[in-house]
């Protein structure tokens, strides 16, 4: 992505955020572009975390939001990163969904590159874009990836492993 496109992506997010009245609990969405995945790994060095890739157009993802909110409340020590695999122009709807599900206060990102396949490949070369996609990273960043909806028991079993 050229510097000009990155700048425009960031500008679109800023304009979307600034054009809305500031609301309590509004998600701070970071632009996810080439290099962002490595940035996430670096910023969470030696720390276990869970990364959930979702979309506003994925009905299974939306049904999963209340459970993710419950996990966030039950395990405040767990770092959760939400990545919306949507066009950056959907910022308002993304923020609304995150706020409604009380997930606005965690680390939230949104695709900010037209080449979504490149972003997917950077995250996981074995991933073909199916959603939801959840990654469980232990403190050494060994990861387990799961496509599809998980039950509370599924989440808990995997979280026990990474939070050791």
Image: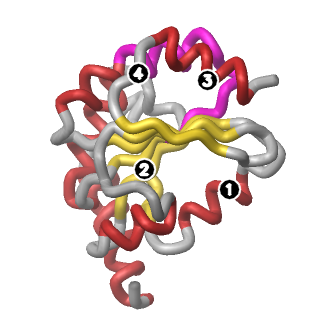
Horizontal and vertical percent for residue 148?
34, 32
* Percent x, y of residue 61: 28, 31
Real-space CA distance between mark 4 and mark 3, rounded to the nearest whole angstrom: 10 Å
The label number, if any, that marks residue 29 in the structure image: 2
Question: Which label sits on residue 41?
Answer: 1
- Residue at 26%, 53% in the rendered image: 86
Residue reaching furthest to the front: 126
Distance, label 4 to label 2, CA atoms, is 24 Å
Mark 1 lies on a secondary structure that is: helix
Q: Residues within 10 Å of mark 4 (few under 14, many from 20)?
A: some
- Of the image marks 2 and 1, the number of the one nearer the N terminus: 2
Q: Residue at x 80, y 46 (%)?
A: 140
Of circles 4 and 1, the one toward us is: 4
Which circle's residue, 4 or 2, is located before the other in the chain? 2
The circle drawn on residue 16 is none
Q: Which mark is residue 158?
A: 3
Q: Answer few, some or many: residues within 10 Å of disc 1's Cα (few below 14, many 20 plus, some between 14 and 19).
A: some
Q: Regarding mark 2 in the picture, which secondary structure is present there? A: strand
Give the residues drawn in magenta, as a range. Answer: 66-81
Magenta-span inclusion, residue 15: no
**Circles 4 and 3 in contact, beta carbons < 8 Å:** yes
* SS at badge 4: loop
| Residue at x-position 41% and y-position 21% | 150
């Amino acid at each position: 992505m050229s510097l000009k496109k990155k700048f425009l992506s960031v500008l679109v997010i800023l304009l979307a955020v600034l054009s809305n009245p500031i609301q309590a609990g509004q998600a701070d969405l970071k632009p996810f572009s080439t290099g962002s995945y490595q940035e996430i790994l670096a910023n969470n060095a030696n720390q276990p975390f869970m990364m959930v890739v979702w979309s506003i157009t994925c009905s299974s993802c939306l049904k999963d939001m209340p459970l993710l909110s419950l996990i966030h409340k039950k395990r405040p020590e767990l770092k959760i990163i939400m990545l919306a695999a949507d066009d950056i122009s959907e910022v308002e709807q993304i923020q609304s969904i995150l706020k409604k599900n009380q997930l606005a206060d965690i680390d939230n990102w949104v695709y900010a590159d037209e080449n979504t396949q490149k972003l997917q490949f950077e995250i996981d070369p074995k991933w073909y874009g199916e959603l939801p996609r959840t990654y469980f990273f232990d403190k050494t960043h060994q990861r387990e990836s799961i496509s599809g909806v998980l039950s509370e028991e599924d989440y808990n079993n995997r979280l026990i492993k990474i939070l050791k």
